[in-house]
Amino acid sequence: MTVVRTDEDRGLALCADAEGARHAVETALVEPLAAGRVVLVHAGVAIASLAGEVAP
Amino acid sequence: MKFVDEFRDAALGRAVAGEILSLVEPGRHYKVMEVCGGHTHSIYKYGVDDLLPANVELVHGPGCPVCVIPMGRVDDGIAIAKVPGVIFTCFGDMMRVPGSGGSLLDAKAAGADVRMVYSPLDALRIAKQNPDKQVVFFAIGFETTAPSTALTLKRARAEGVKNFSCICSHVTIVPPLRALLESPDLRLDGFIGPGHVSTVVGARPFEFIPDDYRKPVVVAGFEPLDILQAIAMILRQLAEGRCEVENQYKRVVPYEGNLRALEVLAEVFELRPHFEWRGLGFISHSGLKLSEAYADLDAELRFSVPGVRVADPKACQCGEVLKGVIKPWECKVFGTACTPERPIGTCMVSSEGACAAYYNFGRFAREREVV
Ligand code: SF4
């Protein structure tokens, strides 16, 4: 998913999946994140943040 | 997103398939296990096996989180779900896994409040919205999903949510692999390492496979080209007489894993002395339970559970499928008594299960092998 907006105080990010649907994702394991970053999400938690804009 | 198309490019796929052909010794039969159910799914979805020479056989491994849950654990979940005042939450696939007296879906039909969630965080949200109920989450999965459960429990603790608990059936990937390597019925030449689990644990934990058993491991991504390239890398190691852990999925998997995730896991969980796997029996130090510090959020301590071992149904051959000893269609009930709509065994329930993958995508491959 691609990060749309981060909410650092709550440890969350709004992310868009491949179809454009938005999800709130827990970011504690991959912070810091910025908009545009691609993350690998499992069960609501980002477990990897990918260098560059590539396909997970 | 960029590059997805490249990972599914048919011409590139054929080029890697040509490389694979150049690496195999005629007359030698190669057995490569894909550990992860996600790989099994991709292989049949994209027909990766159709691009391989006949003497390269893919064997499906035990890495499907739903498939390995034994009947007794499902019964434990159902016992809690039936307690009045409990909202029982789990992933969608778990609802259909048969226990000895039906599934969670059957329990729901009989009046239990069983709800599907996409994440344990959703379950915690339900708990906050229903302070007069006890909300229990059925936690399953390998090291890929365990961090999500761990973070949820940490949040529950930090926010003082008292009506939330978790029945923990998380498992770890290394012990079943060691058990498979020790089993005499299987002669494997190499392993396609699980990409998403490795995102968390890294590639290093698989070093025991080349070190102790002299077999190559290549951690791989989930696009068809990732899998083909990993097979080529394994065959190249074999051709050159090497065996080591290589990382084909470097764009996602750091060799050392996600250290923050590992820290959270170590804080919230501890290893059980034994855990029962469906079809594989008890494997030492292969399951997780909540650590002392989180014991108050452990549903197994909050509620009484039967905790009884229940033998798999006689017709079920999931154990052999999970060990890669038989192909799904060799099970006597495959596609007849056991289908995704009415599963007897777990491998037919999840889309990552080998039986479901064969049933949904693999009929042609089956016919080809039979002819
Ligand atoms: S066909 Fe059904 S019972 Fe047989 S191995 Fe597959 S899931 Fe298990």
Image: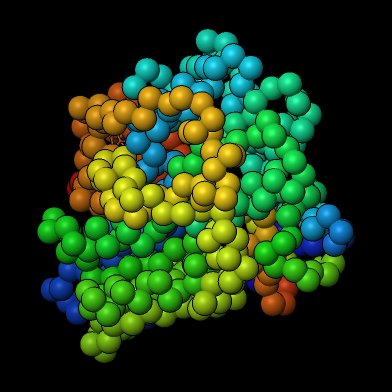
> Which of B300 and B215 lies nearest the eye of the viewer?
B300
Q: Residue furthest bottom?
A: B240
Asked whether the viewer can see residue B210, the reply is yes
The quadrant of the rendered image in which ligand 1 is seen is: top left
In the rendered image, residue A30, in percent from the top left (x then y), is placed at 70, 67
In the rendered image, residue B116, in percent from the top left (x then y), is placed at 62, 31
Residue at 58%, 39% (x, y): give it: B296
Colour mapping: rainbow
Residue at 24%, 58% (x, y): give it: B180
On the picture, is B260 further left or further right than B225? right
Residue B2: name its quadrant: bottom right
On the picture, is B280 further left or further right than B9? left
Residue at 80%, 56% (x, y): give it: A12
In the rendered image, residue B118, in percent from the top left (x then y), is placed at 64, 40
Q: Can you say which quadrant of the picture contains the N terminus of chain B? A: bottom right
Q: Above or below — where is B41 with respect to B193? A: above
In the rendered image, residue B86, in percent from the top left (x then y), is placed at 61, 21
Q: Above or below — where is B258 with respect to B303? A: below
Q: Above or below — where is B32 with respect to A52? A: above
Residue at 73%, 31% (x, y): give it: B126
